[in-house]
Every structure is written in structure tokens, then in C-alpha cells.
């Protein structure tokens, strides 16, 4: 309405992390639920108006919030009362100048991915892509018949975009404040849900339900379930297709590119492990280290682009944007290959990003904080296999000579400085970390034993 960039912020962020985003984005106004206000109060920039929204009862129930946590703090602006001061806008609302959402960077600081609004031609082309990738077209029912549940947090780019596309398609939207596997089954049955957007961690938790619970609910209304955000183990995907039927779909892409690759259940069963084929208009290549296109079956860096998505930049970091472009396409930092039929497979990540439960985590940020801890000589943080979350964090610490550290000490130190999901589940200690000739820690030697034992690479 006011022509501003909407920028969601992860409520799990520590005050320091939130402060960085508030300041880096140049926020002109901040809107926050009442229960979250006190957690970021110290991070709020001066002279920026802050509006408090009453916490919805569904969130209060989902998180078991006490009454004192949801009361509007004294002296703050009540969003609803503030809006009532103004007459309703009868004219068409102003078009926002675009969108911006923060995604973590390897430097440890998140970067704002800023995008201009689409042209009329791009918008028309993207409607077709969304119809294929999200299922919001007449092949899966009229808009008034579509019922979808947004199962992920709206501060992440994928659920945020999915919710917006569902809204524009005219679908009925249900927000699940906190994912609970059996509750989702209850919602599907009660509201005859037709569409879902999920991540593989949710599949794992659903499959762990007792058989009597899984058979208890009528899921026959489901027409189109799509997942993304992290690699899905083959046995998990196959089990979900067997349970829910051939309604499971998958796409691959990033905040920077949007969805560029897609596959349905039939394609997946014919090509187990694939994340799909390029959607209409998209270009996907695999390059070697020199930037030359590789032949089918050869592993290299994945680059991709789709003209239907407006170009982007990293807010305040044009150089990072230039580095992301290779062969006229965008590199998302993933390693993989294309088979003879053009289906894409992920093998590894070019950088050390960890995807845990669909959330991107960068070890460099955690290592930077660990280096501040008294008694830490050096450290390495990386992802290890996790049956439920795909990956979880492991920290290996080299104490300074004479220092005595414990796993509890390390976790407590990080918990004070970082969001909870960035605190490693596992902490180990070594007197000497393996190093390359250059002196750089040889992370692969630390990480490999865990993945070899799990029988997978990612």
C-alpha cells in the first residue's frame, strides 16, 4: 500500500542478528507480533517507528505462550488502532518497488536478495511456471476449490512465495503456525486440503507416525503436494508416494532464481534421486572449474536461470552479485550432474552450507563466534547426516594448550550469541585438526567418516 519493500525477518534471530538486518536494510518501519517484541527490543534502531500486532490465538496455542508474553507493551503503537485513524483506501494500491528477503551468506552476515517487480511479459510467463510447479491452475481444480496449508515459516523465501502465489490464485489458505505431523493430517481431513508445500524433514516426521495414526485420516482430497529446500532421501520420497499416491512433486531453485527445475511422481520413480528437469523457459547447465559446459553425466557446478523471474541484486553488495553469474546464468553453490534425459541430480555443495530441516545454515558464522570463546584455539563446523532433518551441525574444537572445555560450555556460549538452530547438536574435541598444506583446516577429512557411515554424500 505504501510502496515499500516488504522484508520478513526470522524471529529465531538473536538481537544482534536482527539488529544487523534492521540497519542493513534501512528499515523505515518495523511491524512485530506482541510476543516477539521483548526479544528484539534492544535491537530496534532509534527513530524508526515500531508497530505491535496482537498475537493471534493460533500462535498462542501452538507455542503455549503465557498471557504476559502477548500483552501489548506500554508505550508502543498498536497496529490495528493506528490503522483505524485513516479512511479506507478506495483507489488501487501502490505497486511495491519489488521484494527483498534475507538469505544467509558465507561471510556470516545475511544478504538481502533484492528484486524489481516483473514486467507484464515476465508476469504472464511466470503464471505458467507457477501452474506447473505449485499446481495452481485448472488441472487441479477451480480456485475456490483449492485449499492449501502453508506449513513453513513465512520468513523463508519458499513458504513466503508459495503463500503469496496461493493468495493470488484465489486459493483458500490455512497457516499452520508450528508444524506437527498428526495435526497436519487432521487439517487435511477436516478442511479437505488439496495443495501443500513441504520440506523433506516433514516427510520424515510424518513417516515416523504409528501405522494406526497414518491410517486414521482421510487424505484423498490431496491433489498436488510439492517439496523443496533440501535433498530428499530416495527411500523417504518413495515411501511418501506409496502412502499419499502420485501427488508428490518437487522443484529446485533458490531465492535468487526462483524455481527452475521440476519433477512429478512418475518422473521421480523413473529417475530415483532426481530433483527434476528444467521448466519451460529455464536454462540449466553444469560447468567445470573453468566455466566450460560439461557433458551429460559429468559432475560440476550447477548454474541456472529463468527469464520469467526479474533480475536481482544483493542489497549493498554488487560484487557478490557479479560473482554469482557464470556463463550468463546464476550459480547457487550446488554440485551435481544432468543425466542423458536432462534430469538434474545433486551431489554436493560447492560451499559448506548446511541444510537442516530445510533451513540454510552457514558454518562460517558459527566458527566466527566460536573463535571468540576463551580457550578455543581453532574450530571447524560442518554438516553430518541426520535422519529427521537431513543434516545437523557438528563442531570440532581444538582447545588452546592447557584449556579445559566441555560440550556444554561450547553450546551455552553459542546459544547466547546465535539463534538456537545454529547451535551444533554435536561437539567434539581434537588436540590437532587436520590441515591442508596451506594451513587451512581439511574439513573433508573431518566430515567424510560420518557420510561414509550413512552411505550417502548429501
Image (cartoon, grey):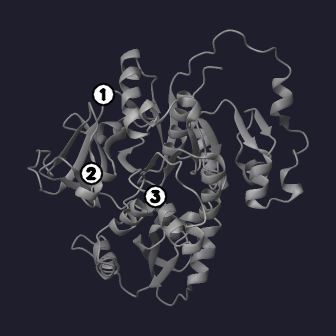
x, y (%) of residue 287?
16, 48
Observer-nearest residue: 253 or 199?
A: 199
Instruction: Spot the residue most to the right.
Output: 74
Observer-nearest residue: 281 or 9?
A: 281
Q: Helix, strand, or loop for circle 3?
A: helix
**Seen in the image, is 101 located left or right of residue 408?**
left
Distance between the alpha carbons at the discs numbered 1 and 3: 34 Å
Pointer 3 residue: 244
Distance between the alpha carbons at the discs numbered 3 and 2: 16 Å
Residue 207: in sight, yes or no? yes
| Image quadrant assignment for residue 434 | bottom left
Could you tell me if the residues under marks 1 and 3 are in contact, i.e. CB atoms within 8 Å?
no
x, y (%) of residue 110?
49, 48
Please count the marks in the image.
Answer: 3
Question: Which of the image's four quarters has the C terminus?
Answer: bottom left
Pointer 2 residue: 267
Question: Which of the image's four quarters has the N terminus?
Answer: top right
Could you tell me if the residues under marks 3 and 2 are in contact, i.e. CB atoms within 8 Å?
no
Q: Helix, strand, or loop for circle 2?
A: helix
Q: Name the front one of labels 3 and 2.
A: 3
Look at the picture and state if 290 lies above or below 82.
Answer: below
Q: Earlier in the sequence, mark 1 or mark 3?
A: 3
Residue 361: in sight, yes or no? no
Q: Residues within 10 Å of mark 3 (few under 14, many from 20)?
A: some
x, y (%) of residue 344?
23, 51
Q: Earlier in the sequence, mark 1 or mark 2?
A: 2
Q: State the mark number for residue 307.
A: 1
Q: Name the front one of labels 1 and 3.
A: 3
Q: Residues within 10 Å of mark 2 (few under 14, many from 20)?
A: some
Amino acid at each position: 500500500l505504501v510502496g515499500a519493500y516488504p522484508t520478513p525477518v526470522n524471529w529465531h534471530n538473536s538481537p544482534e542478528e536482527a539488529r544487523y538486518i534492521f540497519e542493513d536494510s534501512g528499515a523505515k518501519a518495523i511491524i512485530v507480533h506482541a510476543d516477539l517484541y521483548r526479544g528484539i527490543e534492544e535491537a530496534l534502531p532509534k527513530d524508526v517507528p515500531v508497530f505491535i500486532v496482537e498475537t493471534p490465538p493460533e500462535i498462542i496455542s501452538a507455542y503455549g505462550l503465557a498471557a504476559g508474553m502477548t500483552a501489548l507493551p506500554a508505550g508502543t503503537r498498536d497496529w490495528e488502532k493506528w490503522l483505524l485513524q485513516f479512511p479506507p483506501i478506495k483507489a488501487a494500491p501502490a505497486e511495491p518497488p519489488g521484494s527483498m528477503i534475507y538469505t544467509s551468506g558465507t561471510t556470516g552476515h545475511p544478504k538481502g536478495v533484492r528484486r524489481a517487480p516483473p514486467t507484464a511479459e515476465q508476469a504472464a510467463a511466470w503464471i505458467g511456471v507457477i501452474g506447473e510447479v505449485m499446481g495452481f491452475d485448472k488441472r487441479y481444480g477451480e480456485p475456490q476449490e483449492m485449499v492449501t496449508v502453508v506449513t513453513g515459516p513465512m520468513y523463508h523465501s519458499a513458504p513466503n512465495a508459495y503463500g503469496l502465489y496461493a493468495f493470488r490464485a484465489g486459493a483458500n489458505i490455512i497457516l499452520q503456525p508450528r508444524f506437527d505431523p498428526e495435526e497436519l493430517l487432521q487439517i487435511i481431513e477436516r478442511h479437505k486440503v488439496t495443495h501443500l508445500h513441504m520440506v523433506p524433514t516433514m516427510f520424515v516426521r510424518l513417516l515416523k507416525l504409528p501405522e494406526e495414526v497414518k491410517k486414521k485420516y482421510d487424505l484423498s482430497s490431496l491433489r498436488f503436494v510439492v517439496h523443496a529446500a533440501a535433498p530428499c532421501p530416495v527411500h523417504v520420497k518413495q515411501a511418501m508416494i506409496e502412502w499419499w499416491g502420485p501427488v508428490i512433486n518437487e522443484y529446485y531453485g533458490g531465492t535468487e532464481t526462483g524455481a527452475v527445475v521440476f519433477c512429478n511422481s512418475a518422473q521421480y520413480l523413473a529417475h530415483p534421486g532426481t530433483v527434476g528437469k528444467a521448466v519451460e523457459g529455464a536454462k540449466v547447465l553444469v560447468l567445470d572449474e573453468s566455466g566450460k559446459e560439461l557433458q551429460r553425466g559429468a559432475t560440476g557446478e550447477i548454474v541456472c536461470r529463468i527469464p520469467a523471474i526479474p533480475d536481482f541484486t544483493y542489497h549493498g553488495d554488487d560484487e557478490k552479485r557479479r560473482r554469482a553469474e557464470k556463463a550468463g546464468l546464476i550459480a547457487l553453490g550446488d554440485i551435481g550432474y544432468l543425466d542423458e534425459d536432462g534430469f538434474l541430480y545433486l551431489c554436493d555443495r560447492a560451499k559448506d552450507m548446511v541444510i537442516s530441516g530445510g533451513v540454510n545454515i552457514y558454518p562460517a558464522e558459527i566458527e566466527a563466534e566460536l573463535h571468540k570463546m576463551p580457550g578455543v584455539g581453532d574450530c571447524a563446523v560442518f554438516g553430518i547426516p541426520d535422519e529427521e532433518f537431513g543434516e545437523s551441525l557438528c563442531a570440532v574444537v581444538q582447545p588452546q594448550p592447557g584449556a579445559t572445555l566441555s560440550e556444554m560450555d561450547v553450546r551455552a556460549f553459542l546459544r547466547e550469541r546465535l539463534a538456537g538452530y545454529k547451535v551444533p547438536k554435536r561437539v567434539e574435541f581434537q588436540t590437532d585438526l587436520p590441515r591442508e598444506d596451506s594451513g587451512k583446516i581439511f574439513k573433508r577429512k573431518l566430515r567424510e567418516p560420518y557420510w561414509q557411515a550413512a552411505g550417502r554424500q548429501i
